[in-house]
Image (cartoon, grey):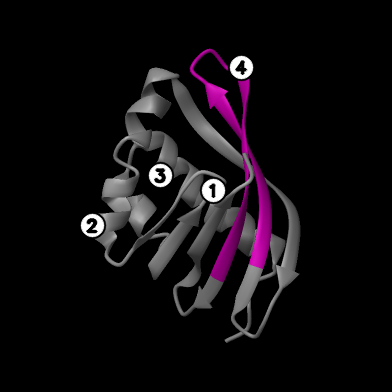
């Protein structure tokens, strides 16, 4: 299976992931991850080995999206690099829409994606701040 570098496929994937994030759909978020998976930032790193662990790691984020009244997320794909037959690194800037229709800038991330029979899955998330 070759790495997903098709922008339409990646846009669909990140649309689904963004919708799950803003809806607080922990199961939907977990379904976007390959296992084991990892999150890396300048201040911490953690891994997860089950869908439950993925859901628990996003448990605190869901209320913050609701509190900020974020109702939609848009991933602006900045760069896609094929790393191997099944891996791609994707640079994404997130932008959110609040309940009054205003744009809210988000963060930038790099996602190491694995292409599976079910489509892209996130192996590693790197927060760029």
Is the C-beta separation of discs 4 and 2 under 8 Å? no
Spatial CA distance of label 3 from label 4 is 20 Å
Q: Is residue 17 above or below residue 84?
A: above
Q: Position of residue 84 (x, y in %)?
A: 66, 83
- Front residue (pair 11, 58): 58
Residue under label 1? 41
Is the C-beta separation of discs 1 and 2 under 8 Å? no
* Quadrant of the rendering where the N terminus is positioned: bottom right
Instruction: Determine whether the residue tagged by mark 3 lies in a helix, strand or loop.
Output: helix
Spatial CA distance of label 3 from label 1 is 21 Å
Horizontal side, residue 68 vs residue 74: left or right: left
**First reached walking from the N terminus: tag 2 or tag 3:** 3
**First reached walking from the N terminus: tag 3 or tag 1:** 3
Q: Main secondary structure of the magenta part?
A: strand
Q: Nearer the viewer, mark 3 or mark 1?
A: 1
- Front residue (pair 61, 117): 61
Instruction: Determine whether the residue tagged by mark 2 lies in a helix, strand or loop.
Output: helix
* Quadrant of the rendering where the C terminus is positioned: top right
Is the C-beta separation of discs 3 and 4 under 8 Å? no
Spatial CA distance of label 1 from label 2 is 21 Å
Is the C-beta separation of discs 1 and 4 under 8 Å? no
Q: Which residues are magenta?
A: 89-113
Q: Is residue 79 visible?
A: yes
Residue under label 2? 52
Name which quarter of the figure residue 113 lies in: bottom right
Q: Is residue 35 above or below residue 15?
A: below
Disc 1 packing (10 Å; few <14; some 14–19; many ≥20): few
Residue under label 4? 102
Q: Nearer the viewer, mark 2 or mark 3?
A: 2
Task: Decide whether residue 127 is among the magenta residues.
Answer: no
Spatial CA distance of label 1 from label 4 is 28 Å
């Amino acid at each position: 299976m070759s790495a997903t570098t098709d922008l339409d496929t990646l846009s669909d994937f990140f649309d689904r992931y963004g919708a799950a994030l803003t809806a607080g759909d922990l199961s939907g978020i977990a379904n976007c991850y390959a296992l084991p998976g990892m999150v890396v930032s300048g201040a911490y790193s953690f891994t997860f080995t089950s869908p439950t662990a993925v859901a628990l790691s996003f448990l605190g984020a869901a209320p913050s999206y609701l509190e900020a009244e974020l109702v939609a997320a848009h991933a602006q794909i900045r760069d896609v690099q094929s790393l191997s037959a099944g891996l791609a690194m994707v640079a994404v800037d997130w932008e959110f829409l609040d309940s009054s229709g205003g744009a809210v800038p988000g963060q930038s991330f790099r996602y190491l994606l694995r292409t599976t029979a079910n489509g892209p899955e996130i192996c590693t998330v790197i927060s760029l701040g």
